[in-house]
Image (cartoon, rainbow, N blue to C red):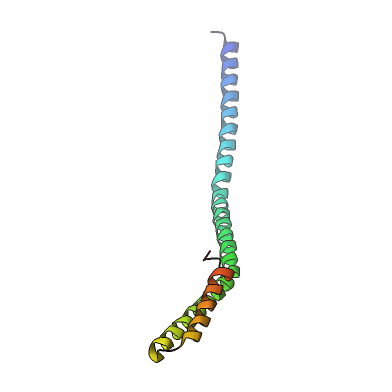
Amino acid sequence: MNPQVLESISNLVIVLQCVTLVASVIALFVSLGKIAAKPNKTQDQRLDALESWQKEVNNRLEHGNTHFESIDEGNTVMQNSMLAIMDALISGDNKDELQKRRNDMYDYLTKKKGLLS
């Protein structure tokens, strides 16, 4: 073979090796960049989940007080009614108190809670 052809082929191989080397170095840097960014991405996902959870908890806490007040009010009505029933059973004559407590319970269940129709 002609020495010029061999030299041209040799030069072409060297150029292709340089291109391959540069591409490998670029691929290495890209891979390192992805590896370095992965902990931040994971941390950001965890922080987003925690912030979402915190908003939900705060929302429940805001509405919790009104819920507990409603439960307390219902318990008071029920306990007063139970006391009236016990008084009527003990004394045998407490019709007015029983009617009053029944009306209180009825009002509570219909007007405030809409539980009875």
Residue 103 to residue 3: above or below: below
Measured as percent of width and height from the top left, residue 94 is found at: 46, 88
| Residue 16 appears anywhere in the view | yes
Residue drawn at (48%, 83%) of the image:
98
Measured as percent of width and height from the top left, residue 72 is found at: 52, 77
Residue 93 to residue 39: above or below: below
Q: How many marks?
A: 0
Measured as percent of width and height from the top left, residue 64 is found at: 56, 70
- Which residue extends farthest bottom? 91
* Quarter of image, res 70: bottom right
- Which residue extends farthest top? 1
Residue drawn at (58%, 32%) of the image:
23
* Quarter of image, res 55: bottom right
Residue drawn at (59%, 70%) of the image:
111
Seen from the viewer's position, the closer of residues 86 and 113 is 86
Seen from the viewer's position, the closer of residues 6 and 17 is 17
| Residue 61 appears anywhere in the view | no
**In the image: residue 26, left or right of residue 93:** right
Residue 15 to residue 82: above or below: above
Measured as percent of width and height from the top left, residue 6 is found at: 56, 14
